[in-house]
Amino acid sequence: MDLERVILSAKQKALRINLNQDLYGTFAEIGAGQEVVRHFFRAGGASGTIAKTISAYDKDFSDAIYGKEAKGRYVCESRIDKMLEHEYDLIEERITREDHPTKQYFAFANTVATINYHKTTQGHGWFGVKFQTAADKLPNTIVLHARFHEQDALLQQQTTGMLGVNLIYGAFFFYKRPKELLQSLYDNLDRDQLEIDMIQMNGPDFEEVDNRLMSLQLVKQGMTDAVIFSPDGRNRQAADVLYKKNILAIRGSFRPVTKVNIDMIAKGLAMFKQEPKVDPDNIQVLFEITLNNLSAEGDIDEQDFLDRADVLCSIGQTVLISNYQKYFKLVEFFSRHTKKRMGVIMGAATLVEIFNERYYRDLNGGILEAFGILFSRDLKILLYPWMDAESGDLWTSESTPIHPRLQPLYNYLVFNKRIADITDYDPEVLSIFSRAALESIKAGGDEWVNMVPDFVDRVIQENCLFGYCGAVKSEKGAGEDPAEAAARAIEQKP
């Protein structure tokens, strides 16, 4: 039986690090005091651990040390990367291995903005540690982003100190168990205090770590409600991806991506680009998978998640994993980062569910409160038709069955073009469902091949995803990069 991990206090963690004669490094903190290194000074025995501590508050002085930021932002990922690289390189340059053959060097850095006096901007910060796990090994790097929820700057400073200690301690003592390292970041902290919405682990000791799984764990463990990773599989902070963008999102299981998914995003994107308030060169497309969708068959299957992620990344798409079962929560999340027009592509069957009042029983204002959040933003729903298999009826904005009590609200949104039909859809793909394609793959059939685009077909076969174990590989589109083929299909290019 596994024993429950003993949670140490910040002082105990700092002292254990201080008493290790081989751990030696620099602390560089900007924006919220020197809250992390303070724990190490107070714990005792810090003289053998702390090489240097620096707090370059003044922007000009900070620029002189770490270089200027192109966008003029100092609480950003590029800043933390520069700080870690600069401070770690200085240790290696100034402390010779001949004199210290067993030392494990590290550099800790943070750049934080706490809540302002008028409480109009919430606090957030970047934290990172570059560290060795042995004197003869190359360093690893862990970088994370946190949003502070406490409504007092002093409390946010204290949380900064605690999180920094947890990060350094986890890096040295839990690096072999990444999931436990992740959980340890909340030792003596809780979600009411902060939200960790991005983490990236790189280096020789993390070669087997798939950072997309780390993103999934952030949502699964309740550390945040949404995470984003780019086509290269790198975890990204939402603000960096979505800031001031025209966001276009499509939600689905993508298990696997089918021809109907590609038709929805291709026709929806073309339509979205024609919107008067949309800059075609400033659109961020997101393929969203909800945690509820991932756990539809019980516990989350990590391999199944990675199979979906592999397909989406291979075809060049940015992926959002969220805990937002209700659409108004998703739009609320987008609104933190942009005021520009947003679009959500959805099928008519999904729209019927959105107009079902029982989904809003937990809200005091019911469906009106949810719709107030949805449509007080500059949001447009791009409606993809749905074919009723039994009757053969086609559901569009004119024929989608809405409860009579809500019909006036629905008519208002359609009349004001907040809900608009995607009219140039491909009728040949309406009968395709991901569930049927998946069943065919798992059964060893070949019907699924005609349900997915050529580039998805190849990705599944070449990587043996979703339980595919066929020996014969499709030659369709052979030699062409799947991401380029997908981009051409989505952008409707010949």
Image (spheres, rainbow, N blue to C red):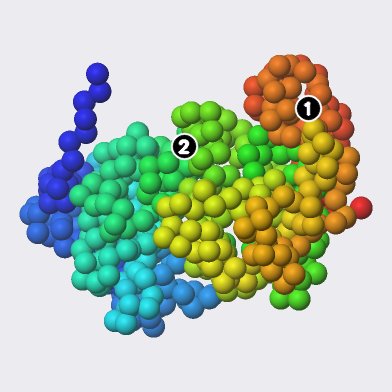
Q: Of 96 and 147, which appears nearest the observer?
A: 147
Q: Position of residue 116 (x, y in %)?
A: 32, 78
The answer to whether residue 8 of the structure is visible from this angle is: yes
Earlier in the chain: of badge 1 and badge 2, it is: 2
- Residue underneath mark 1: 448
The residue drawn where x is 57% and y is 30% is 304
Q: Is residue 79 above or below residue 383?
A: below
Q: Of 219 and 290, which appears nearest the observer?
A: 290
Q: Amino acid at mark 1?
A: Trp
Image disc number at residue 337 = none
Q: Amino acid at mark 2?
A: Val
Asked whether the beta carbons under mark 1 and mark 2 sit within 8 Å of each other, the answer is no
Describe the element under mark 1 as helix, strand or loop.
helix
- Residue underneath mark 2: 209
Q: Position of residue 322 (x, y in %)?
A: 51, 49
The residue drawn where x is 80% and y is 69% is 274
> In the shown orientation, is residue 23 left or right of residue 438?
left
